[in-house]
Image (cartoon, helix red, strand yellow):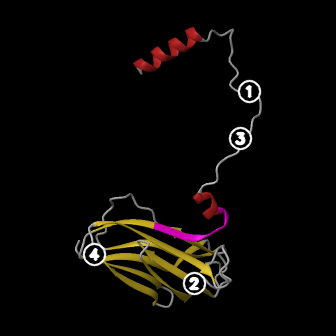
Amino acid sequence: MKYTLILLCLVSLACPPTAKADVFDFKPAIKAGEISMEDLVAFLDLNIYKYELLLKKGSKVKVVFQNFKNNRTLFSHEIDISENKAYTMKLSFESMEGYPGDALKKSNENLNYSLNWDYTRVFSGTKSNPLHGYPSTYVQRQTFEFGETIDDKKTLLEFYSYDEKADKDELVAGIYLEVLAGK
């Protein structure tokens, strides 16, 4: 409070009431902006997700894509960890035609996926799209602070259907990561 009063006094001395400064006294201007990777991913509606994991040697990581509606595992991959270090995992989905764009849209019955583990190992395949046939859908990505521990399962992505009439979301599928040993 004391500092606010001092600041107000200084401002009133520097800007007497007769000298009004117009903060909107400028000329219109334009500048070309840089396009970031995040801009491209959002603009093209790409389904690409990247995670960084700090893991111990001897651990085993399991990544599972589970369809909750029919209790079916769409994929499950295990990776043995050979070094104590930070690993990079990228997960992507694309349409069967291989076009960039929202592969998870409701009209795509099947989709291609790729799980790239630390730029050295790739798992890929074609799976049924858990969001196929729902009128409204969306994918929610979970965000983590680097250093957040993996105590049990960590949900990476959640796939929802949305019923506009009932104003209700329903969890349809999810991708989770689990560290099986070496915690």
Cβ–Cβ below 8 Å for labels 4 and 2? no
Instruction: Describe the element under mark 2 as helix, strand or loop.
Output: strand
For marks 3 and 2, the one nearer the N-term is: 3
Q: Is residue 97 magenta?
A: no
In the picture of the structure, the residue carrying the numbered disc 1 is 26
Which residues lie in the magenta part?
Answer: 43-50
Q: Residue at 70%, 45% (x, y): give it.
A: 32
Disc 3 marks a residue whose amino acid type is Lys
In the picture of the structure, the residue carrying the numbered disc 2 is 112
Q: Residue at 62%, 58% (x, y): give it.
A: 39
Q: Between 138 and 91, which is closer to the camera in this rendering?
A: 91
For marks 3 and 1, the one nearer the N-term is: 1
Disc 1 marks a residue whose amino acid type is Phe
Instruction: Describe the element under mark 1 as helix, strand or loop.
Output: loop
Q: CA distance from mark 1 to mark 4?
A: 60 Å
77 displayed left or right of 15: left
57 displayed left or right of 12: left
How far from the left and from the top, in percent, is residue 154? 37, 71
Cβ–Cβ below 8 Å for labels 3 and 1? no
In the rendered structure, find residue 82 and report the number of the disc placed on it.
Answer: 4
Q: CA distance from mark 2 to mark 1?
A: 52 Å
In the depicted structure, whether residue 133 falls above or below residue 165: below
For marks 3 and 4, the one nearer the N-term is: 3
In the rendered structure, find residue 31 and report the number of the disc placed on it.
Answer: 3
How far from the left and from the top, in percent, is residue 17? 65, 10
Instruction: Describe the element under mark 3 as helix, strand or loop.
Output: loop
Which marked residue is nearer to the observer: mark 2 or mark 1? 2
| Image quarter of residue 26 | top right
Which marked residue is nearer to the observer: mark 1 or mark 4? 4
Q: CA distance from mark 4 to mark 2?
A: 28 Å
30 displayed left or right of 133: right
How crowded is the residue under tag 1: few (<14 C-alpha within 10 Å), some, or many (20+)?
few
